[in-house]
Image (cartoon, rainbow, N blue to C red):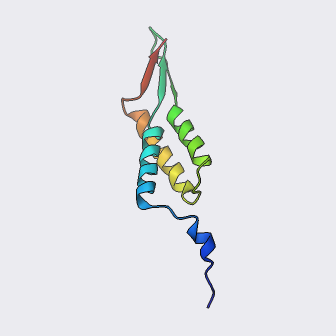
Amino acid sequence: MAKKNKSTNAGSSQTDGGFILKVTLYVILGSLWLKVTKSGSNLQLPLPLGMALGILFTTHEHFKIDRKIEYAVLVVAALFGFVAPYGLFINL
């Protein structure tokens, strides 16, 4: 029977509440877009500001086990935020 090394698993555990809080943060961040429009024109420039900030948080995170899940949550939230009529709108 193989022995399990307890020192590698003890430092990388995360609570369920911490994971839910983190996923909620990524959903909120991923859905934020900065949409810039020019006055008198129908041209609109959407910028995924929240997704860029979420990716920055993901790369500097302590628990790197669930990084693929966090990226997937950010992408789905960004797609929803692009279609939904909320965010920061700036008219120039």
Q: How many marks?
A: 0
- Report x, y in % for residue 84: 37, 33
Residue at 44% of width from left, 37% of height from top?
A: 31
Location of residue 32 in the rendering, given as x and y in whole percent from the top left corner: 45, 33
Give how far across and how far down residue 72 sits, in percent: 50, 51
**Residue 41, placed above or below residue 52:** above
Farthest residue, direction left: 85
Q: Is 6 located above or below residue 67 in the figure? A: below
**Residue drawn at (59%, 54%), measured in percent from left and top?**
62
Residue 60 lies left or right of residue 24; in this view the side is right
Relative side of 54 to 7, left or right: left
| Residue 45 percent across, percent down from the top left | 52, 23
Question: Does residue 28 appear in this view?
Answer: yes
> Which residue is drawn at the image coordinates 52% and 64% (left, top)?
13
Instruction: Return the residue nearer the eye: 79 or 50.
Output: 50
**Residue at coordinates 45% horizontally, 9% vertically from top-left?**
39
Q: Is 12 in front, or is 71?
A: 12
Examine the rendered structure and indicate whether residue 76 appears above or below residue 50. below
Quadrant for the N terminus in the image: bottom right
